[in-house]
Image (spheres, grey):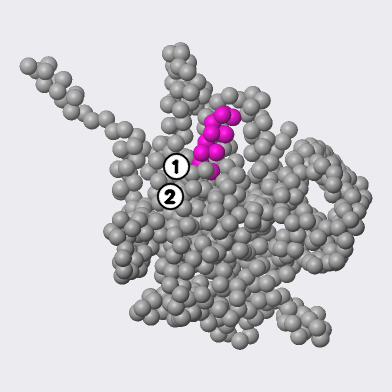
Amino acid sequence: MMADNGLNKQNEYTVETPWQIAWRRFKKNKIAVIGAIGFFTIAILVIVVPMIYAFLLFKSQEGITTTQLIKETIFVDLRAQGFELSNSSLPPSLEYLLGTDKQGRDIMFRLFYGGRISLLVGVLTAFITASLGTIIGGIAGYYGGWVDSILMRSAEIVLSIPFLPMMIVISAAMRWVPSEQSIFVVVFVVGILSWPGLARVVRGQILSLREQEFMLATEALGLKDSSRIFRHLLPNVLAYVIVSATLGMGSAILLEAGLSFLGLGVTPPMPSWGNMIQVARDAHAFRNFPWMWVPPGLMIILTVVSVNLLGEGLRDALDPKDIR
Amino acid sequence: MGQFCNSKIASIIIILTNLWVNYCYFLLVQFVKGVETMLKYIAKRILQLIPIMIVISLIIFLVLNMMPGDPVQAYLGQGSEVPPERQEQIKELLGLNEPLIVQYFMWLKRVVIERDLGRSIVFGDDVSSIIGTFVWNSFLINIFALFFALIIAIPIGIKSAVKKYGIFDNFFTVFSLVGVSMPTFFFALILIFFIAIPVDWIPLNGMRTPILSIRGYESIFHKMFDIGKHMLLPVTVLTFTSLATLTRYTRNSVIEVINQDYIRTARSKGLAEKVVIYKHAFRNALLPLITILGMWIPSLFGGAILLETVFLWPGIGQVLLRGINNQDLSLVMATLVFYAILRVLGNLIADVSYGLADPRVRVE
């Protein structure tokens, strides 16, 4: 009986997985939670608000079936070009909460629809940069030798390319891409120029992990290369990749805004926060219609602040060296 | 007695002089050796940079040639009535029908051997002289911003590090978070809207008052005053954005140093806290800053493109944008290569000055 009790006691001891530890630490970090809440609120708003607009617009139309209504609500698209042509350049009022722009389009709608585009650019870019960086850094670190030197040389070259000027030139060279696809131009341009930083770090970590005993064990067990890389090496660098992807998302949103402000990123009529601020380059609109360019700027700041808070929080929560 | 004394003093003086001369000689030899290794290191690094620069310029060249549009058409201007066969001749003459890689080497040969960057279409002048003039305008605002950012950021960084998580530190944490998360151009627009428009004497944009630059300035001070007035807002924006990152870096590197053993030693010796921080910690905390500055100055130049657009500041970024909009390929090519050189040299200078400042990483 006594022995039985002892065994039961041992079973009660719960083991926390690294993810559970991270989650517990993340929850304790108030600032990070605020960042996460802010970011997800903005994400939900930019998805839902355009839908509400479309729903209200189409509900009042005669002869529209429920299926059509749902379809129109979910796939809001042409409204981006001109949701409702009314009087142009109206200041904010009860009818148009943020006023209308020069073409008479509702700025509130464009703000949230543009938010979709800006967030999409951020998420996609972060994803592409993170995957390129992890894959290239992982291959270089794992295989070493000439593969490593070729990849790291190219990383060095890409790092030496002047970042913003080169992005401007590439986007200018791809100006022929139509408005709807211009998002992917931005994603592509930012993605191919910003992987080397992450690739270097991942390579460095893989180089040191490769020499540790558990990797010797995987070799002794005769595991395949793919299993050794994806199941045993990459999970160890994942924390760093997630943090750098989150922070990279913030800077991607900023870069998109900058490029679009110059008229090179996401091109009108498709709205994005950056190209909505472009109005301010016209001296008359800049002075007299601040409601056209101030809200998107504030949205950018809000979003990037929350993303950065989230990233910093994740960095603290996922830091394996600092076990609390 | 006097004699003895004199001779003794004389011998002491001789010994001391000897020691002194020897010591100076030793220092000199060390210095020459140091300079020699440093020069060797720099030469080696520059040699390594050459292939990298060639690859980078090749990439830039290929990307530029992806730009839609016909360079001959751009050169002749819109709607020019030059017959197509003549245009074809021009193309042949300029070597535009050759494969791209051949064209690249033609460019490289022209730049390296003939030292000719080509002629700009937009400005109607030699590219090298255009870059030469406009780069100083960019340099002007950047150097001022850097100066102000450094003298403000370092004390703030130290103070936040010393009282970690205090009110002061938390305030500047939030400050730099907002600074990093704010698009530079939006901040610039806000400043123009809320400061330059209401306040009469602060100019909205540009570098000189138009009427004055036509009529001419009364004196050099008048000119300096006028340009200074125009620099006010751009320098504020640049300083602010640089401040956001620099305070963080300073704070973190001071915190790292404060936790070292030798700081504990200094404290346990009973040194005043001021001496510990400013003499023992600060000097070592500066080391990482050197690296950051080297890598960061080029990006400051690049990042100022948007700022120059908002303030219509006639800097190198404006040259680049005008070149792109007018398909002025030789101008854009030269500007981009200039940025790349700036970046690569920034890294080199960072490494070298790090070696000079920190004896531990001196190269053998």
| Residue type pointed to by label 2 | Glu
The answer to whether the residue labelled 1 contacts the one labelled 2, judged by CB atoms less than 8 Å apart, is: no
In the rendered image, the residue lying farthest to the front is A63
Write down the residue under mark 1: A242
Q: Residue under mark 2: which chain is it in?
A: A
Image height check: is A190 above or below B195? above
Write down the residue under mark 2: A312
Mark 1 or mark 2, earlier in chain: 1
Asked whether B184 or B89 is in front, the reply is B89
Q: Characterize the magenta stretch by its predominant secondary structure.
A: helix
Q: Is residue A135 magenta?
A: yes
Q: Which of the 4 image quadrants contains residue A268?
A: bottom right
Q: Residues within 10 Å of mark 1 (few under 14, many from 20)?
A: some
Q: Which type of secondary structure does the marked residue at label 2 adopt?
A: helix
Q: Position of residue A298 (x, y in %)?
A: 46, 67
Magenta region: which residues? A129-141
Q: Residue at x 81, y 60 (%)?
A: B73
Mark 1 to mark 2: distance in Å? Answer: 11 Å
Regarding residue A268, the answer to whether it shows in the image is yes
Q: Residue at x 66, y 62 (%)?
A: B305
Q: Which mark is residue A77?
A: none
Q: Is residue A131 magenta?
A: yes
Q: Position of residue A310 (x, y in %)?
A: 40, 51
